[in-house]
Image: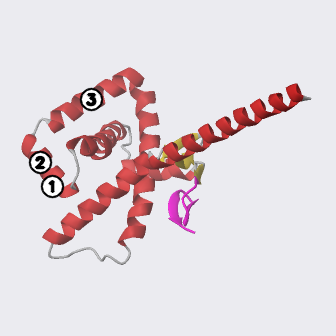
Amino acid sequence: MLYRHNSMKKWMIVALIIVAVLAMGGVVASVLSWYPVAFVGSTPIWAHDYNANVMLATNYYNYYNKHSENPVAQSDLAGIIRKAALSNLIDAHIVDKELATHYGNKAFISEINTRIASTTSDTNFMKNLEEAFNTSSQDITHYFIKDKIRYQMLDEELGALNPPQSIESWLEEQNKNLHVTILLGGLIWKDGIVTDK
């Protein structure tokens, strides 16, 4: 009887440790934003990427409004930024996939890194972006410059087709056939775009 009691006690302790470890992992994942906010097919879009895009856009519009004669109205800005940030990440997924197919994965990464190095070597340009986005050059490079380069690369490829195609029309066509699951409250994927519920 005593042996059975000690055995149950050990299992209870082991179960409590497992629950504590899982709870701690959930807290760490939440704090670090390592949880999905959407899925493109079965590929997750992570909260840390989404939050960084929202922060950059918010910082940019704050800077723009301070220095513009025609500031953007603040009333709808948060909702517009949420939708645009998520749309941008969905589009980036599609663009990456297409470029990796066209270039091959290694050549694609090499070409992006070459173009990033060329763009970021202009210190005045980077300083101006840091001021406008109110963040580090590392975040600007990862979430802004890299995106612009990807779009530029795909635009070049689409422009070389016969007949040429714009990146906007290409993305619109791709988005129509895309399966996206959005986990963020208040937003849904409908007819190929992120929209309000």
Query: Which quarter of the rendered picture does the N terminus lie within?
Result: top right
Query: Which quarter of the rendered picture does the C terminus lie within?
Result: bottom right
- The earlier-in-sequence mark between 3 and 2 is 3
Position of residue 11 measured from the top left corner of the image (x, y, whole percent) = 77, 32
Q: Residue at x 40, y 52 (%)?
A: 88
Task: Tell whether position 42 is magenta.
Answer: no
Callouts 1 and 2 close, C-beta under 8 Å: yes
Helix, strand or loop status at disc 1:
helix
Position of residue 107 measured from the top left corner of the image (x, y, whole percent) = 35, 22
Left or right for 13, reference 59: right
On screen, 44 above or below 7? below
* Residue most extreme to the front: 2
Residue type of the residue flagged with mark 1: Glu
Q: Is residue 104 visible to us here?
A: no
Label 1 crowd (10 A; few <14 / some 14-19 / many >=20):
some
Q: Residue at x 24, y 60 (%)?
A: 60
Q: Residue at x 50, y 48 (%)?
A: 30
In this rendering, the label closer to the viewer, 3 or 1:
1
- Circle 1 residue: 131
Residue type of the residue flagged with mark 2: Lys
- The magenta stretch spans which residues? 182-197
- Circle 3 residue: 113
